[in-house]
Structure formats: C-alpha cells, structure tokens
Amino acid sequence: MVALERLSPRLQKHFLDMPCPTFDATPWVTGPPVAQRKVALVSTAGLHRRGDLPITPGSPDYRVIPADTPADDLVMSHVSTNFDRTGFQLDWNVVLPLDRLRELAQARDIGGVASRHYSFMGAIGKLDGLEHRAGELAQDMRADGVDAALLVPV
C-alpha cells in the first residue's frame, strides 16, 4: 500500500476521515485453545495460481490456494490505482502469510496449517453474492477440519 504522505492532500483527508468500526471482543463461538486449532488463511489480495482464471473486479468469487503452492506460482489480480504490489513481489507473506503460519505450527502456537487457503478480490463494490460465496468457503473449511481462519485484508 502506498504511504499516506505520498498521496494528494485530498486523498489523505479522505482516508483519514474514514470511520473505523469497533467490535465487541466477545467471541462469536467457543472452541479449543488456539494451540489446538487448524488455521486457514483468507486474503483479499486477489491471488490465484498461474493458470487459474483471474478474479475479476467486483466479483464475489474466490480462489483456492493449496498450502503447497510455491510463492512464484502466485499471481495477484487485485486492481486499484492506489495499490502498491512491491511488498507482494518482495515477500508473499505480506498478503498470504503462509510461511509465518507454518512457523507458528512448528512452534506449536497453533494446532496446524490447513491444506487449502483462499483469496477474494479486495475492493468489492457491491456485496451481492458475497454471503453465498462465504458460506461455500465456510463449508469447504469445515470439511477440511479448519476451526480458525486468519483474515488478511489487503
């Protein structure tokens, strides 16, 4: 992402004036300790594997990224004039922290790493269809034994 001071004064004001929601700290569900949970990643970087169809702008679709996907096999189809891809090009963990997740599993801070991870397109304008797609994704994760997801907004 571009540094705030590199934006025009109008854009700086726009971003600084955006409301920031607050959330109740009460968990929606209960479950095992994090050290026993299998964790999946859900990114909004518009990632897909080479050869997969890109995610089109505004689409509620997502792409499945197997955990054994090499970093150089990932392509970013995220679109935004204000989006800087440099971080992704230098270290994919900026948008899909799979290496960090593996380190947490090895240190036994989490119970395990899911076999599949997911990426939506960020900057989805209309949310039509998104709830349905999120429900599909939740079913896929449940079938894989995933009991925690790390959301990686980009």
Image (cartoon, rainbow, N blue to C red):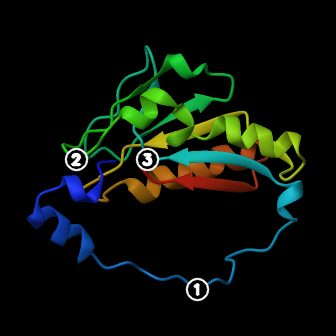
Cβ atoms under marks 2 and 1 closer than 8 Å: no
Q: Which residue is mark 1?
A: 24
Rendered location of residue 9, percent (x, y): 11, 65
Q: Which residue is mark 3?
A: 44
Q: CA distance from mark 3 to mark 2?
A: 15 Å
Q: CA distance from mark 2 to mark 1?
A: 31 Å
Q: On the rendered structure, is 15 left or right of 63? A: left
In the depicted view, which residue is nearer to us: 40 or 3? 3
Other-residue count near label 2 (Cα within 10 Å), few / some / many at <14 / 14–19 / ≥20: few
Q: At x 24% / y 68%, what residue is drawn?
A: 15
In the depicted view, which residue is nearer to us: 69 or 93? 93
Q: In the image, which disc is placed on residue 82? A: 2
Q: In the image, which disc is placed on residue 91? A: none
- Report the amino acid beneath label 3: Thr
- Report the amino acid beneath label 2: Asn
Other-residue count near label 1 (Cα within 10 Å), few / some / many at <14 / 14–19 / ≥20: few
Rendered location of residue 64, percent (x, y): 55, 33
In the depicted view, which residue is nearer to us: 85 or 57? 85
Given the current orientation, which residue lies at the most extreme front position? 5
Rendered location of residue 70, percent (x, y): 60, 19
Q: On the rendered structure, is 78 left or right of 98? A: left
